[in-house]
Image (cartoon, grey):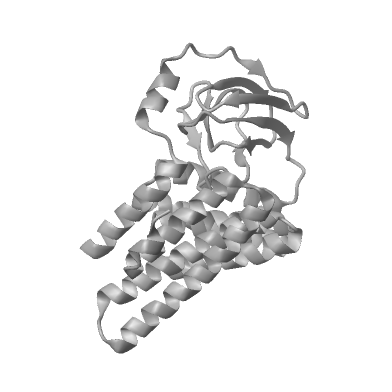
Amino acid sequence: MSAGMALRGHVHRGAWLACLAAVAAAAAQAQAQSPPAAVSLREGQPQTATHTAEQRFLYGVDIGSGTYLLRVEQQGFDLKLAIERTGAPTETYDSPTFRDNDELAVLSAPGHYRVEIYSDESTNARGGHTITLTNVSNLPAAELEALRLVSVASIANFTGGGDGWATAADSYARAAELWHDLGRTRDEADALFASATVEYWQRFTWQKSADQAASAAVLYNQLGEAALAANSIHLQGAAVIEQALEVRQNESGAAVAAESEALFAEALRLLEQARATHERLGRVYDLGLVLNNFGYTYFNKGDLARARP
């Protein structure tokens, strides 16, 4: 990766993450709070909570033989799951798609599990979560394998590093293939979106990210999931922006300038699609992220007047 790409990636990710991720002080403040009392979570008995980002929730789970799926529906926050089985190290699960979609963890070893739900976001907004435990032992082998791949990918994404993010992206992509074969369109779309997000934010593989995000958007649109389709299109547009910058950085000349401008135009077209959807749906948070990338695009095109808010 060139120095220019590294710098550009740093500036771009820094700008977007200012809207997405939390500051370290907020995390430290949350950790300093008294630990919450554990709530017993039983199979088929969901627990729901409305809360702020700094609140942490603790659940106790006891399972015997079999395979169980722990699902956390994120409701307005980017949540993480820290899961510790008695006598085993803690594993943290964190899907890469920020506030979108659920956090999943597959539990298969008998014993007592300590499950902590928390967010690193710094926001005064209120959101929540719903956590559910389901016995999935009798599911078909292919479905269990897809769930395990998503679970492994979530751990690998949190672990990070070259190997971790490669494992995460590959596991999500393999899960998407299994979901496709099983006819599970929503799960396929979620896995494609997750893989595309890792490819974009962590691996800088712009074309692969754009292709996967585009495929996810098609599936979400088929399902009537307009907001998720818009976020996938936004991700596709962001990847195309980076392609335009890469083309312009690597070579010069009239042909290169034309190719770069064509990519910028395609990126702006995609961003406009995402903007229009989020504006129509009243999704202010997602709309703000899209507008940030409009500014980033115009700034890199040298159009400073349009880059300003």
Q: Is residue 229 above or below residue 35?
A: below
Number of marks drawn: 0
Residue at 38% from the left image edge and 23% from the top image edge: 28
Residue at 33% from the left image edge and 66% from the top image edge: 300
Q: Quadrant of residue 77?
A: top right
Quarter the N terminus occupies: bottom left
Q: Is residue 287 above or below residue 177?
A: above
Q: Is residue 222 visible?
A: yes
Q: Quadrant of residue 128?
A: top right
Nearer-the-camera pick, 280 or 213? 280
Residue at 49% from the left image edge and 31% from the top image edge: 123
Q: Position of residue 129 (x, y in %)?
A: 64, 31
Q: Position of residue 144 (x, y in %)?
A: 67, 48
Nearer-the-camera pick, 154 or 135? 154
Q: Is residue 296 above or below residue 41?
A: below
Q: Position of residue 262 (x, y in %)?
A: 44, 80
